[in-house]
Image: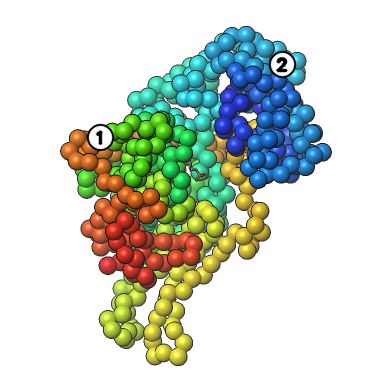
Amino acid sequence: MTAGPATLVIFGASGDLAHRKLIPALYSLYVKQRLPQDLTIVGFAIDDFDDEGIRRSYREWIEAHGGGVDEQRWREFAGRIRYLRSGFEEDAGYGELKSILDQAGPGGCLCYLAVPPRFIVEVIRRLGESGITREDGGWRRVVVEKPFGHDLESARRLNRDIHAVLREDQIYRIDHYVAKETVQNLLVLRFANTIFEPLWNRNYVDHVQITLAEEVGVEHRGAFYDRVGVIRDIFQNHLMQLMAVVAMEPPAALEADALHNEKVKLLAAVRVMEPGEVERYALRGRYRGFREEPGVAPDSETATFAALKLYIDNWRWDGVPFYLRSGKKLARKVTEILVQFKRPPHLVFPGAGGFRARSNLLALCLQPDEGVHLRFEAKVPDTVAEMRPVDMEFRYAESFGESAIPDAYERLLLDAVAGDRSLFVRNDGIEIGWRLMDPVIEGFRLDAERRPCPVYEPGTWGPAEADELLGRDRRRWLYGCGERAGEACDTASHEAAAGQDQL
Ligand code: BG6
């Protein structure tokens, strides 16, 4: 996997991400015997822990959150963890880290920046100054978490500052959605099968819906979220990446640059909205109660829900709308991509009561209840020619077992240690996401000057206005996955119309 011993340094080791995602992922990899034999973990943070203290803190977190540990395995795993107490701006800490690495001898070092965004450049600059990023004794890589800038301008500046110390191929920018097992499977579905790709274009696809819905609100992140909002938090990164994977051309190889080139080419073909057009192509919403959340301004205009209609101006997708939506405090947690095919051009079946065939729907259920469903028409037995939609279903849990889907961080950590950047985001991928979303953010700001943000009730599918975005095109939001697959969604004020996909 990697030559020589490797050291994983977690900046921000005492924080939420390390406890919630990184250490559980590393422990799981250890149990599965996937961690490189000689990987050691150095936790770098200001909080008052020692080696034993941080190990205990991690273990307590895992146990308190339902993930048991095996006594023996945990002891072996925890033995690899040590703690370096230092602020991110203290030179002494970097000096100490350098001597730890020197003592370990030639080998790799992965620095994982689980730090607040304002420290990203600071930490990288000091890593450079202390000689840690020099590759004379082995590879040096840095993992950077989102948010990566807050607009195009700041993202460019950030890229420039980081490139002053590191080469692009040393930088691993995380978008954990890209590494979700079901998102990786999208590539396999599209490019390891022959039956989908011939239909995957404007000749057969009517439109695509991408939904990333969350049941939770902003939880303890009110102040952060109030500055960011749903477009920066979800659309600029996760939804742009999902759209790229579902719509891009086949890459020539499953190799980082080949994949990144295709994604960026696709996103570069997405039509950029003018801020003045936002009313036509986008809408925002705020859940009732958001302004009362801790840390949120009482007069906040931040959107916790948004829906967009985007077009991809290329040969394959010309004229096919991509409807994207995401929000907090929605009816349930679900991430799904629905590919709605066109209706048959001419129906030969003499349906009763003006019956019209429904379109075929391919539902890519990314989470939870992961799977793929294909809905098509079948003849109801013992009728002359009555039809009803039926589902052909693939479920991960049935095909691969309940525990088959690892957390995305397992893949990301392994790949970063192995030097595979395929599931990370290249600098131009980040910048193009901002180029597309900056005008939407500006359009929402202008809209907020004119009218109040539509408010939706927690537990619904967003503001009623979200229906109009599709209603104007004589379409509806659909459920593709879960119990109510194939139905139209209830929003705040609209009743479901079972079985109808178009008006
Ligand atoms: C993060 C966002 O990137 O993704 C959060 O900052 C969001 O607001 C989270 O809750 C959703 O991720 P997942 O994997 O739980 O769907």
Q: Mark 2 or mark 1: which comes first in sequence?
A: 2
Asked if residue 482 lies left or right of residue 93, the reply is left
* Above or below: residue 425 compared with residue 490: above
Asked if residue 384 lies left or right of residue 474, the reply is right
* Above or below: residue 322 compared with residue 376: above
Q: Residue 171 falls in which quadrant of the image?
A: top right
- The span from disc 2 to disc 1 (Cα, nearest Å) is 49 Å
Name the residue type under label 1: Arg
Q: Which quadrant holds the C terminus? A: bottom left
- Residue 238 in the image, given as x and y percentages of width and height: 45, 42
One can see residue 191 in this view: no
| Residue found at x 44% / y 72% | 376
* Above or below: residue 450 compared with residue 210: above
Residue ID for mark 1? 445
Residue ID for mark 2? 100
- Residue 262 in the image, given as x and y percentages of width and height: 45, 43
